[in-house]
Structure formats: structure tokens, C-alpha cells
Amino acid sequence: MKRPQSRTGAAQQLFPLVEQFLGGRLPLRLRAWDGSTAGPDGAPVVVLRSRRALRRLLWQPDELGLAQAYITGELDIDGDLADGLRTVWSAVRARGLRPPQLTVAERARAV
């Protein structure tokens, strides 16, 4: 997939960091609270509606943090949620992606 980038903003800063910490390319597109986007066209779109979503995911980089961000409306997936999750989990299994192991200092710098 092509990796087009539109508008400079939070998404362009976050996307490469997420890929670096997870150890591989992600089959999703990211849209941040400032309207910026990053990631491949045609991929499921993960929407971070606020900086709080980012903080929540940094402090709890697991299913619990993801679920809390989704339930509070800080994070959403455009389109079919089941399809988006299936795509992401399939990539996680196939590529052996790992959750980030961030230090407190790294988490603080990211927000």
C-alpha cells in the first residue's frame, strides 16, 4: 500500500512513533484531533479525538487502555469496527508486533 501523508500535524508525528514502538508497519490510517492524517489509503481509520486518548494509550498500552479510550469516545474507528479490529489483530499475529515498552520519561515526552 502507498503511504500518502496529508497535512502536517499530530498524526504525522505519531504514526512513525507507533510503528517504531510496535516494531512494524501498521495496516491502518491515523486521524488525529487536529484533523491531520497519516498511513495507507484504503486502510481502516483510527481516530484519536483528543490528546487524552493518546495519554490513555501511553499509560495503558494494552487492550484495557484501548477499550477505555473507545468507550469514553476519545478513540474511534471509521467504518466497521469488527473489520477494523480484524485487520489490526491479523497484522499483529502475522507480523509478531509487540506492545510498546515505554519508560515514564518517554511517555511524558509523547504527551
Image (cartoon, grey):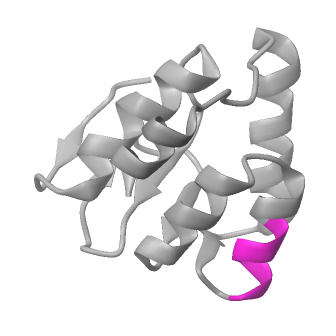
Compared to residue 89, the image places residue 43 above or below, namely: below
Compared to residue 52, the image places residue 93 above or below, namely: above
Query: In the image, which residues are magenta?
Result: 67-72
Is 8 colored magenta in this rendering?
no
Residue at the (72%, 47%) spot, across then down: 61
Q: Is residue 38 visible?
A: yes
User: Observer-nearest residue: 77 or 62?
Assistant: 62
Q: Is residue 39 visible?
A: no
State the image coordinates of residue 5 (x, y, percent, origin top left). Answer: 21, 41
Residue at the (34%, 25%) spot, across then down: 2
Q: Residue furthest left?
A: 8
Residue at the (62%, 24%) spot, across then down: 22
User: Observer-nearest residue: 37 or 74?
Assistant: 74
Magenta-colored segment: predominant secondary structure: helix
State the image coordinates of residue 25 (x, y, percent, origin top left). Answer: 53, 20
State the image coordinates of residue 42 (x, y, percent, origin top left). Answer: 49, 46
Compared to residue 22, the image places residue 94 above or below, namely: above
Q: Residue furthest front?
A: 105
Compared to residue 109, the image places residue 2 above or below, namely: above
Kindly indicate the quadrant of the structure image that contains residue 14.
Answer: top left
